Image: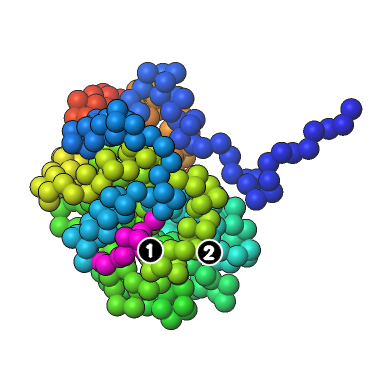
Amino acid sequence: MVTPREPLAHRLQGFGASIFAEMTALAVSTGAINLGQGFPDYDGPRDVLDEAIRNVAEGNNQYPPGIGVPALREAIAHHQKRFWNLSYDPDSEVLVTMGATEALAGALLGILNTNDEVVVFEPLFDTYAGCVALAGAHLSPVTLQPQSDGRYGFDADQLRNVITPNTRMILLNSPHNPTGMVFTRDELQLVADIAIEHNLIVVSDEVYEHLTFDSAVHIPIATLPGMYERTITISSGGKSFNTTGWKIGWACAPAALLNATRMAKQLFTFAGGTPFQSAIAVGLQLPDAYFEQLAADLQRKRDMLLPALRDAGLQPITPEGTYFITADIRERFPHGDSMQFCRALPAQCGVVAIPGGVLYDPRHSEEGKHIVRFAFCKQDDTIKEASQRLRSWA
Ligand SMILES: Cc1ncc(COP(=O)(O)O)c(C=O)c1O
């Protein structure tokens, strides 16, 4: 009998099944509260939902133009100008994608050549490593570490030292998943200086652009001097309008840079999500008060969960943005094995979290072995119940 060949491409070997699937399955089988996956368990703004319903009902259900419906491209360009003072031509410098994920895949596969190197800040969103591998390129990780001031930060020398003649790109994410770090202007300037000195492209994932807390301010790196021309800025409607399942995202960049993304993107989905595209256009035009309330609500949820994690004997780092809190488990669990912790937590405590080690480059998985990520983008009652479970388990 002929042994079947391994069907998985070499480039994808070493990437196990997603940890999110394993933890969500555990949530279902134990009835635990799922603070693992980062999606809100509440709906987005009524006007946005109604626009999608109206579109479906009125027969707006066929393929959109490959680059996206004009109303959304115009709304994205207008949003970039209104919030960040960045100017993009809606016809040649804005590309609508199926979520930020497709924009990221398009940028990475459209630009990278085999053996190119991509600087990333770890822990990192899991799509990055997979897409860099699919492109035949390699990760050059720079590790974000908790600093004495209670925020995450990075070592400028480590950033400088990972650059080689093969470095082609810096893949930045701010506000950052999972650390909740919002890069300061000085931190962005360090990244920008290196990008300019080595003539690198920057892909900037800004899906949490509106989710910043306290005095943290989101600064798109494209606004720094000399960066506009080398930056692809990516975002999506999922986090800003609580519509993660719609998968309407976008990329903005000067036309030549955007074109490389578009060349790859057209081979994936080509286009999609017609009725949702103009609904997200409605969302992008909501008044400032909507975006302020969105961040304030999330900050309140963060502040409900943080003390419960401390009471449970964990050491959370206060996030400056995003949906996530990371916590160090070592004081209560000296073994420091977050995988073991997360596999036991649903049955013991009735809460699901994500182990941090899997979000690091495999060469550095020890760096995040003791880190656990909790999502707080859940209804207040859900957070209250999770907090109570964490406290009674303590
Ligand atoms: C940093 C980051 N980038 C991209 C995405 C994916 O965005 P989308 O759902 O629009 O594809 C996520 C979703 O969790 C994320 O956390």
Sequence-wise first label, 1 or 2: 1
In this rendering, would 322 be left or right of 167?
left
In the image as oriented, which residue stretches furthest toward the left? 289
In the picture shown, does residue 119 fall above or below 68? below
In this rendering, would 303 be left or right of 183?
left
Measuring from the top left, give residue 163's x and y in whole percent.
51, 73
In the picture shown, does residue 136 fall above or below 187? above
Please give the residue where the numbered disc 2 appears in the rendered image: 111
Q: In the rendered picture of this protein, how many numbered marks are placed on residues? A: 2
Amino acid identity at mark 1:
Ser
Observer-nearest residue: 355 or 37? 37
In the picture shown, does residue 18 fall above or below 366? above
Q: For residue 182, what is the image quadrant?
A: bottom left
In the image as oriented, which residue stretches furthest toward the front? 59
Mark 1 Cα-neighbour bin, 10 Å: few <14, some 14–19, many ≥20: some
Measuring from the top left, give residue 233's x and y in whole percent.
36, 61
Q: Does the residue tagged 2 have its C-beta within 8 Å of any atom of ligand 1? A: no
Measuring from the top left, give residue 133's x and y in whole percent.
59, 54
- The residue segment tinted magenta is 86-95
Which residue sits at x=27%, y=59%? 77
Q: Which mark is residue 117?
A: none
Mark 2 Cα-neighbour bin, 10 Å: few <14, some 14–19, many ≥20: many
Give the CA separation, mark 1 to mark 2.
18 Å
Amino acid identity at mark 2:
Ile
Which residue sits at x=31%, y=60%? 90
Magenta segment includes 91:
yes
Query: Secondary structure under badge 1?
Result: loop
In the picture shown, does residue 73 fall above or below 378? below
Q: Which mark is residue 92?
A: 1
